[in-house]
Image: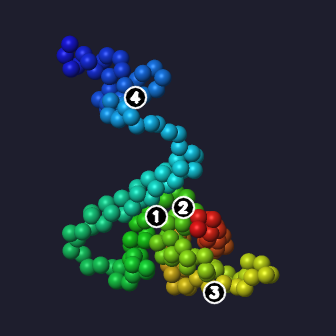
Amino acid sequence: MTPEDSSQSPGYSKTGLKNTGKGFESDLEDPDHERRFVTTKEFQAVEKEIEDVKEELKCLKWKVRHIGETVQPLAEDSKRYNGYTLTELKAMVQFEDDPYKAAHKILTALFSDVYLLQHSVTEQACNSRSLPKPKIDPELYTVYCDILKSIFPGISSQTLREETQHVQKSTQKEV
């Protein structure tokens, strides 16, 4: 039998997986290794991590493409916002279709989780029993709004406030 013939035989796979009829079994697995199921939460956490890595990869690819450029950096790139230039921040979300995901990426790049929890977009108390939180840094918030408005031209200031508050609430749940 030639190698070409063996690729047609049942159960053969170039990946080392064999179809046993009940599922796939790997030739590479340790027979003493016990399989276990993962919870939906664990699966979603891994999916989120993969998405974050993909986004970071996009940014790194963009940086690599622009490494050897002899063009002088734009004036906007001389200033850094929490370590990022305006161009780098825009590149993080340039292919994002979902305003919430874009807002989350930019906010977490510009502000720490603790900062987001301790500050407010509106500088108002969330209820009558709490004190108002200090307002988010207006310069960084303006940068955030400008980036999102450049990617989602129809987005309103009200929607931006709501997206920011939504990200703050999701951050609070994570912490």
Residue 11 location in percent, x, y?
A: 36, 21
**Of the residues tagged 3 and 4, which is closer to the observer?**
4
Question: Label 2 sits on what residue type?
Answer: Lys
**Of the residues tagged 2 and 1, which is closer to the observer?**
2
Question: Label 4 sits on what residue type?
Answer: Glu
Of the two numbered discs 2 and 1 on the same chain, state the one appearing first in sequence: 1
Callout 2 crowding tier (Cα within 10 Å): few <14, some 14–19, many ≥20: some
Residue 101: mark in rendering: 2
- Asked whether, in this view, residue 1 is left or right of residue 35, the answer is left
Q: Residue furthest right?
A: 128
Of the two numbered discs 1 and 4 on the same chain, state the one appearing first in sequence: 4
Q: Nearer the viewer, residue 13 or 87?
A: 13
Residue denoted by label 4:
25
Residue denoted by label 3:
134
- What residue is rendered at 49% in x and 59% in y? 96
- Asked whether, in this view, residue 46 is left or right of residue 62, the answer is right
**Measured along the vertical axis of the image, is residue 21 above or below residue 48?**
above
Residue 34 location in percent, x, y?
A: 45, 36
Residue denoted by label 1:
93
Disc 3 from disc 4: Cα separation: 56 Å
SS category of the residue bearing label 4: strand
**Of the residues tagged 2 and 3, which is closer to the observer?**
3
Q: Confirm or deny contact between disc 2 and disc 1 (CB under 8 A).
A: yes
Q: Is residue 87 visible to us here? A: yes
**Of the residues tagged 1 and 4, which is closer to the observer?**
4
Q: Is residue 156 visible to us here? A: no
SS category of the residue bearing label 3: loop
Callout 4 crowding tier (Cα within 10 Å): few <14, some 14–19, many ≥20: some
Quarter of the figure with residue 173: bottom right
Of the two numbered discs 1 and 3 on the same chain, state the one appearing first in sequence: 1
